[in-house]
Image: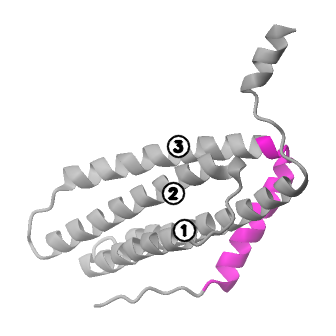
Amino acid sequence: MRKEYEIGLFDSPKIDGKELQDCLAYFEAQTKVIAFQAKEADLYNSAMVKDNNYISEELKAVKRLSLAATEVIRRYEDIENIPSAASQMHYAWHATFLANEAWASAWAEALEAMANSISADMVYVQQLEKEYQRAWKWADEEDRKFLKQLDMSAGDIAEIAARATTEIIANDSWEPGLED
């Protein structure tokens, strides 16, 4: 009997009732922020592939990415009512978004320096990128733990993610104030 209790001690309890509804609302709000970040990353990646030989276009794309990273943090910090069951995941994603902002900002500064024939500390930029990637893995792990507690089907989770992504792509008109 004691062994069963010890094993159950480390299992994540299933979330249900009002707490489940709060967690689902939070998860959807968080998913919208992640969808916005993904949309902006896709725009950046497309610009970098398309305009690979034009430093001015690359600089414009990375500046937008940096501003979008700041917007991601603003949106994430605006999420209200973080359920206690989601607190570890929330913290992990917040750390991830901060790491992304640090990397994007450093990359924008480095690219601007290179555009002006000034040397840039690319080792620092690469270090920040690695920190961002580590943070993303941690947030993804916390995401999985949280979703396991919700005890939802993969289809239900995919539906929430698809709805959030569709809403961001269709209705989000955010544009950064970029200076040329």
Checking the image for residue 23, the label placed there is none
Structural distance between the alpha carbons of marks 2 and 1: 8 Å
Examine the structure image and report whether residue 91 is included in the region drawn in magenta: no
- The answer for how far apart the CA atoms under marks 2 and 3 are is 13 Å
Q: Position of residue 172 (x, y in %)?
A: 62, 83
Circle number at residue 94: 2
Residue 42, x across and y down, in percent: 52, 68
Quadrant of residue 28 within the rendered picture: bottom right
Q: Is residue 83 left or right of residue 47?
A: right
Q: Which residue does the numbered mark 3 point to in the structure image?
A: 137
Vertical position of residue 22 compared to residue 175: above or below: above
- Look at label 2 and name its amino acid: His
Q: Which residue is mark 1?
A: 77
Do tag 2 and tag 1 residues touch (Cβ < 8 Å)?
yes
Q: Is residue 156 magenta?
A: yes
- Look at the image and give the residue range highlighted in magenta: 149-172
Circle 3: residue type: Lys
Crowd around label 3: few <14 · some 14–19 · many ≥20 (10 Å) = some
Seen in the image, is 87 located left or right of residue 103?
Answer: right
Dominant SS of magenta comes to helix
Return the residue found at the far left: 118
Establish if 82 lies above or below 12.
below
Whole-percent x, y for residue 10 in the image: 72, 25
Which quadrant is home to the C terminus? bottom left
The x, y position of residue 118, in whole percent, is 8, 69
Q: Amino acid at mark 1?
A: Glu
